[in-house]
Amino acid sequence: MRPVLHGDVSAAARVLLTAPQADRDRLCARMIHEAELADRHVGQTGQLHPLFGNGSLMAAARNRRLADEPGFDNLQYCQCFELVLRHLITFQINWTRN
């Protein structure tokens, strides 16, 4: 996956905000997996992945419906943002072990 910036986390959190709470964990993991697959594809072929884009989390997220970006006074958005960060931490831990 390409380096993750604030906008990537925000886009993923905005996708999660549109999903039922029970589906958010799985959906977050899926977006990160898609970004990783796309980044590998770009590295191997020099071309964008036909479905998942350039390997950024933002590109994977933007394949889905995004909620308008609320402020951090929105508890649901904060929870979604936190979920994305937790998944990214797990991804980084697993990536450095391999």
Image (cartoon, grey):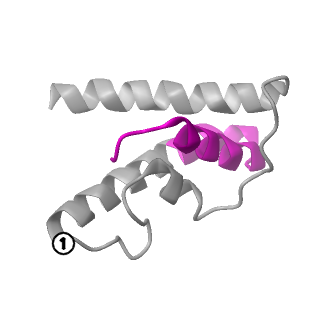
Crowding near pointer 1: few (<14 within 10 Å), some, many (20+)?
Answer: few
Which residue is tagged 1?
A: 45
Residue appearing at x 79%, y 30% in the figure? 76
Residue appearing at x 52%, y 27% in the figure? 85
Q: Picture coordinates of residue 64 (x, y %)?
A: 64, 62
Q: Picture coordinates of residue 20 (x, y %)?
A: 76, 45
Q: Is 76 placed above or below 57 here?
A: above
- Name the one closer to the observer, 26 or 18: 18
Along the horizontal axis of the image, is 27 left or right of 47?
A: right
Along the horizontal axis of the image, is 64 left or right of 89?
A: right
Q: Picture coordinates of residue 46 (x, y %)?
A: 21, 70
Q: Is 50 placed above or below 17 here?
A: below
Q: Quadrant of residue 21?
A: top right
Residue appearing at x 36%, y 40% in the figure? 3
Q: Is 53 placed above or below 28 here?
A: below
Q: Quadrant of residue 39?
A: bottom left
Q: Picture coordinates of residue 68 (x, y %)?
A: 80, 49
Along the horizontal axis of the image, is 65 left or right of 71?
A: left
Q: Amino acid at mark 1?
A: Thr
Question: Does the magenta stretch mainly form a helix, a strand or a loop?
Answer: helix
The reply to whether the magenta stretch includes residue 14 is yes
Residue appearing at x 77%, y 43% in the figure? 69
Which quadrant holds the C terminus? Answer: top left
The reply to whether the magenta stretch includes residue 20 is yes
- Name the one closer to the observer, 39 or 26: 39
Could you tell me which secondary element the residue under label 1 belongs to? helix
Q: Magenta segment, which residues?
A: 1-28
